[in-house]
């Protein structure tokens, strides 16, 4: 009976057995609730426990798991213990505890408050979860990631903006898969490698260290082709950073048409880029003309299989060339030449030195990939899935768990009034694992431990009690393994100098 049909019924006094001197203490209230029916019990919070989200549900965007399971087109019967929603919860739990077997993952998931399974359902075995994952498929996990990635209630750190624009960063990485013929055929194996690899290209929100969008492909798929799938994730109010491997004139034209501003590194060789210098600006940067050559047009037509593609329209952009002199505490020095191309054309509003310094923020995506691969998944661990769909499914779950931890870290940093870098991602992940395991219902009565009055509040309190990490560390070491053995990590100082380019002059003015 729902609350709208519940009604209060006058109840006579309840007399204690064998006593005639008045009602038993508390008896009237109990009798009134019984006579009114269960419809009003929730107003008294008598049954609130049955509807409380587990800690995982509270850390994700509201309704993420249930909505993703409903929208995923999964046709599993609702009476199954591992229905779509329960399987998705187990998948996320498995990504949070990648070192534990399926039996332990199932035990944790089925003990969570408001687990989407019928009360009294026996906990299935590990093989049952393997079959349920296969039934679930990739789409619900991907949809869960998309729903949570779209949330806008995560505080944006000050370092996540520049010139009033939200910083987002493109980059790619690979994940090791289980060594089996099906995955090797689907994703590919590096030459001389021992495991198939999945390629992942993602768009990171720098202010929260959360993934806004991602594309999954095989090892032999180019990062650029995967990045093209993320074009729709850009929009006005954003400033996109990317390494030099992502630039092409076609991609630059399409991505800038989204309304987002771009600040991408480009190759240093003049023959490698379709640029011609228009004029030098007062801060040493240059306005350049982007013009597609005949060979570039021919290559683009061959790749598209369309010999009628028109030549790209000319465009004007701004090129900032600079050197970075690195000096370590032991006296080692290194000079690196870098060129970045940007749609921020005004040297007064966007000085060249600030643009050069801003490019260093691109390294945040490397830190995020380190968190994803080493901290969340675990070093040296391959994904569990042994089919292409399950490998992609698990990747979406890893991305979702990473975002869940990063959102909590960003909220903790905002509450403490400190930078996001000062909150340890590893510490937050460890505390989440600890509190999720503790937020379990009794297998006999179905209630959570009495001491856990508000698991989310206890978790945030525990995070606030952690010591802050050291901020603004400037360190360097060798890039290769041999160099790192020879040159351990050292404190370093960096000097930026704006330098002229060696581009040829444009022979004509822009036609647009």
Image: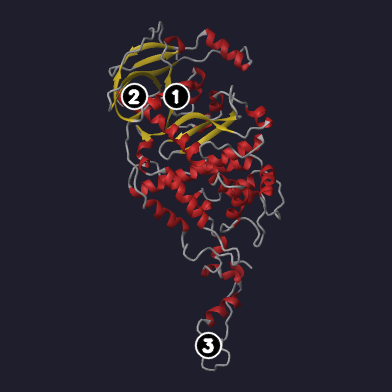
Q: Earlier in the sequence, mark 2 or mark 3?
A: 3
228 sits to left or right of 413: right
Q: Can see residue 474?
A: yes
The residue under the point 32% across, 32% down is 474
- Total numbered labels placed on residues in the image: 3
Q: Residue 358's image quarter?
A: top left
Q: Residue 352's image quarter?
A: top left
Q: Viewer-proximal residue, 401 or 122? A: 122
Q: Residues within 10 Å of mark 3 (few under 14, many from 20)?
A: some
Between the residue at mark 2 and the residue at mark 3, the CA separation in whole angstroms equals 80 Å
Q: Which residue is mark 3?
A: 23
Q: Earlier in the sequence, mark 1 or mark 3?
A: 3
The residue under the point 62% across, 35% down is 178
Residue 216: mark:
none
Q: Is residue 379 above or below residue 127?
A: above
Q: Secondary structure at mark 2?
A: helix
**Colour mode of the rendering:** secondary structure
Pinpoint residue 427: horizontal percent, then vertical percent. 42, 46
Q: Which residue is mark 2?
A: 356
Q: Which residue is mark 1?
A: 243
Pinpoint residue 418: horizontal percent, then vertical percent. 33, 44
- Location of the N terminus by quadrant is bottom right
Discs 2, 3 touching: Cβ within 8 Å: no
Q: Is residue 485 above or below residue 143?
A: above
Q: Earlier in the sequence, mark 1 or mark 2?
A: 1
Q: Can see residue 150?
A: no
Q: Secondary structure at mark 3?
A: loop
Between the residue at mark 1 and the residue at mark 3, the CA separation in whole angstroms equals 78 Å
* Disc number lying in front (1 or 3): 1
């Amino acid at each position: 009976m729902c609350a709208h049909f519940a009604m209060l019924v006058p109840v006579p006094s309840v007399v204690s057995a064998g006593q005639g001197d008045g009602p038993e203490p508390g008896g009237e209230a109990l009798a009134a609730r019984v006579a009114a029916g269960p419809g009003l019990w929730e107003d008294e919070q008598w049954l609130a426990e049955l509807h409380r989200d587990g800690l995982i549900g509270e850390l994700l965007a509201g309704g993420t798991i249930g909505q993703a399971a409903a929208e995923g087109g999964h046709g599993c019967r609702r009476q199954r213990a591992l229905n779509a929603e329960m399987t998705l919860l187990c998948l996320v739990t498995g990504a949070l505890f990648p070192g534990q077997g399926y039996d332990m993952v199932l035990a944790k998931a089925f003990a969570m408050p408001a687990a989407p399974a019928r009360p009294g359902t026996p906990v299935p075995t590990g093989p049952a979860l393997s079959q349920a994952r296969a039934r679930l498929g990739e789409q619900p996990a991907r949809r869960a990631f998309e729903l949570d990635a779209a949330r806008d209630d995560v505080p944006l750190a000050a370092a996540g903006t520049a010139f009033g624009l939200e910083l987002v960063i493109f980059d790619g990485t690979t994940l090791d898969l289980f060594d089996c013929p099906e995955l090797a055929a689907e994703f590919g194996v590096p030459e001389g490698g021992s495991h198939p690899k999945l390629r992942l290209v993602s768009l990171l929100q720098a202010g929260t260290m959360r993934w806004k969008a991602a594309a999954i492909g095989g090892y032999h798929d180019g990062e650029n082709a995967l990045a093209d799938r993320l074009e729709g994730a850009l929009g006005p109010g954003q400033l996109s950073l990317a390494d030099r491997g992502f630039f092409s004139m076609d991609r630059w034209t399409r991505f800038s048409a989204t309304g987002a501003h771009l600040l991408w590194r480009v190759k240093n060789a003049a023959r490698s880029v379709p640029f011609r210098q228009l004029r030098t600006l007062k801060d040493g940067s240059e306005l350049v003309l982007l013009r597609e050559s005949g060979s570039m047009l021919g290559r683009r037509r061959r790749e598209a299989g369309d010999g009628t593609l028109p030549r790209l329209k000319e465009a004007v952009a701004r090129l900032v060339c600079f050197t970075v002199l690195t000096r370590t505490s032991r006296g080692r020095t290194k000079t690196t030449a870098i060129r970045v191309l940007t749609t921020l054309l005004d040297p007064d509003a966007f000085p060249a030195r600030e643009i050069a310094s801003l490019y260093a923020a691109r390294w945040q995506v490397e830190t995020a990939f380190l968190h994803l691969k080493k901290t969340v998944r675990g070093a040296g661990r391959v994904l569990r899935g042994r089919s292409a769909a399950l490998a992609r499914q698990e990747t979406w779950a890893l991305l979702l768990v990473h975002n869940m931890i990063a959102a909590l870290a960003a909220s903790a940093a905002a509450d403490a009034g400190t930078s996001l870098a000062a909150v340890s991602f590893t510490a937050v992940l460890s505390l989440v694992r600890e509190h999720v395991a503790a937020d379990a219902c009794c297998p006999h009565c179905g209630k959570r431990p009495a001491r856990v009055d508000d698991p989310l509040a206890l978790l945030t309190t525990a995070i606030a009690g952690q010591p802050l990490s050291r901020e603004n560390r400037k360190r360097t070491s060798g890039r290769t393994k041999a160099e790192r053995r020879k040159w351990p990590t050292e404190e370093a100082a960096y000097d930026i100098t704006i330098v002229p380019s060696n581009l040829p002059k444009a022979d004509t003015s822009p036609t647009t």
